[in-house]
Amino acid sequence: MGEEPVRASWAEALLSFIQRYPGVHLREIRRRLGIPIGTLDYHLYRMGREGLVTIQFQGGYKCCFPAVVPEIGGPIPEVDRKLLALLRLPAPRGIVLYLYLQGPTGPAELGSTLGTTGSNLSYYLHKLEEAKVLTREGQGTQRVVRLLDSKQVHRLLLQFPPLPETVVDRFLRFWSELHP
């Protein structure tokens, strides 16, 4: 094994990652950057004290945001933070992207296309509805799900791209398709 990088390079890598992927969850940072949890906590605490990052809980996850985004001249608005935190999770991201690309869709088609269970889909639809990202309209077989503000989704996806898929992500997806 190689030597642990010096603290300054951990901090630089961490800040750069949070600036590129605001709303990223603590566990995902640890997984992607390989920073030991104690080191990660230390740097996040220090950067928070210095006013470089903010940490907030969203949906049971500790999410990290840059305190200021130069392109917008300030912090990310709260409504955008909620959506960004959800877009960092695979299931909500899949739901939002599908609705963005395909338009209003029935829950059955959405679940089937995304390959998720009804209860999992319902859970994330509820979370996205609470965050005012989408709405469910109609009843029974006439029910459809639609985005409330596709322009917000478009803007955030362009400004803050999703995390790239890793080799492990691809393997797990492949494995789950082989063993449903």
Image: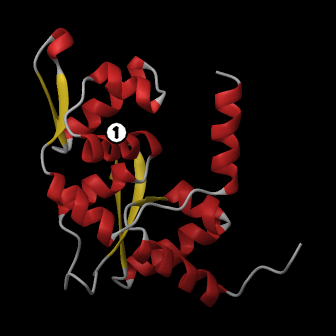
x and y percentages locating residue 100 in the rendered image: 26, 47
Q: Is residue 127 above or below residue 82?
A: above
Q: Which residue was labeled with disc 1?
A: 95
Side (left or right) of 113 relative to 151: right
Furthest toward the front, the residue is: 102
Which residue is rendered at x = 23% and y = 70% of the image?
Answer: 76
**Who is closer to the viewer here, 68 or 95?**
95
Residue 41: x, y in percent? 54, 67
Q: Quadrant of residue 148?
A: top left
Is 37 rendered above or below residue 74? above
Task: Specify the amino acid type for callout 1.
Answer: Ile
Quarter of the image for residue 153 reads bottom left
- Extreme-top residue of the structure: 140
Question: How does the figure colour the protein chain or chains?
Answer: secondary structure
Tell me if mark 1 has few (under 14), some (14-19) or many (20+) residues whose alpha carbon lies within 10 angstroms of its own.
many
Image spot of residue 104 (x, y percent): 19, 34
In this image, 165 relative to 83: left or right? right
